[in-house]
Amino acid sequence: CWVCLVVVFSDVVWVINYDLPKSPKDYVRKIVSCFDRNVKVINFITTNDNTAKKDIETAFNVNMINLPQNLTNLNVSDL
């Protein structure tokens, strides 16, 4: 049971997710339903998460991009 099923965190701009859910349904419960639609999510993804990553990308029609090694090159407006 996720805390966010009761509370929606509407003032959050960024979420750092250390544990990628294994299915799009669980991702919705953990991330999408907990925060405002405008939230940006950083998912820590291992090679073991590739199938789940592809399933989530397909379900939500999104592309999870890799962060650059040097974060000074990160253009937040492109996210």
Image: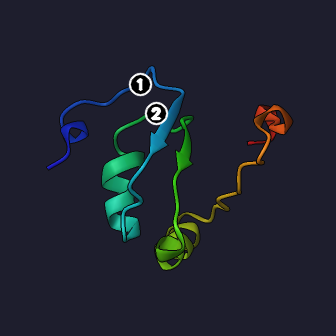
| Residue placed most toward the observer, 32 or 47 | 47
Snapshot quadrant of residue 75: top right
Q: Residue at x 67, y 62 (%)?
A: 63
Q: Is residue 32 above or below residue 76?
A: below
Foreground pick, 65 / 32? 65
* Disc assigned to residue 10: 1
Give amino acid for label 2.
Asp
Q: Secondary structure at mark 1?
A: loop
Q: Which mark is residue 27?
A: none
Q: Quadrant of residue 74?
A: top right
Amino acid type at mark 1 = Ser
Rendered residue at 42%/47% (across/down): 32
Could you say where residue 6 lies in the image, as x and y percent from the top left?
18, 35
Residue at image location 71% in from the left, 56% down from the top:
66
Q: Position of residue 21 (x, y in %)?
A: 36, 62
Residue drawn at point x = 54 percent, y = 75 percent: 50
Q: Position of residue 40 (x, y in %)?
A: 58, 38
Quarter of the image where the C terminus is located: top right
Find the distance from the CA under tag 1 to the CA under tag 2.
Answer: 5 Å
Q: Mark 2 = which residue?
A: 36
- Mark closer to the chain start, 1 or 2: 1
Q: Residue 55: image x %, image y %? A: 50, 75
